[in-house]
Image: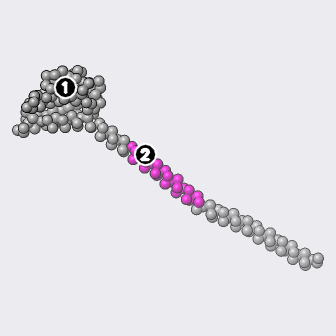
Amino acid sequence: MSYTDEKTSNDRIDALSKLSEISVEGAGERRHRKLFPVLLLCVFFVALLLALIAGVAVYRHVSDTQNANVSRREGVELIANIVRANDAKGAVATGEGPEGKSLVIVENLDSGTYETRLYLYKGKIVQEYSLSGTAYTPAKASEVTESSRFDFTYGDGLLAVTTDQGTCEVALRYLQGGE
């Protein structure tokens, strides 16, 4: 082998070696270029997942608050609706229940006088429908709502019923000229 052949051979080896170095550097850059879109996609995925989790948590909180408000109002509103449905002259009276005073709605029918009694019994407000003059029977009463207190006042044609859920006021129509 001559000197020129050897020099040419060395030049070729140097050239190939530089090409391989450039190729290796280029491959590293290409890997970084391919890695960036994957990382960006992962960041967007994580952000969307966090937004979904936050949305579910907010929805759950709003739903729980709404359900609590509805159940809180159910009991006292049911009592008000019972009074409104039976609003007539002499229909609202006071009785003595097992654990304090009771709100009595009187109905005079051809078959007799009946009472819808609302009173507190063992941490619940119960409703009992009975013949007038009979003893209170909590065993046959149906639960209206849970409450540790039940009170009502009447004045100026306005009946105010107070429970743990709040106070509800009912304007009695028969005092305003209604039947």
Asked if residue 90 lies in the magenta stretch, the reply is no
Residue at the far right in the pictured view? 1
Question: Residue 56 in magenta?
Answer: yes
Residue sitting at 19 percent across and 37 percent down?
81
Q: Residue at x 9, y 32 (%)?
A: 109
Q: Which residues are magenta?
A: 38-61
Q: Taking 74 as reference, is 136 above or below it?
A: above
Real-space CA distance between mark 2 and mark 1, rounded to the nearest whole angstrom: 43 Å
SS at mark 1?
strand
The spot of residue 123 in percent (x, y) is 29, 26
**In the image, what residue type sits under mark 1?**
Ser
| Quadrant for the C terminus in the image | top left
Where residue 19 appears, as percent x and y from the top left, is 76, 71
Residue wearing tag 2: 57
Q: Which residue is under mark 1?
A: 102
Check the picture and name the quadrant holding the N terminus: bottom right
Q: Secondary structure at mark 2?
A: helix
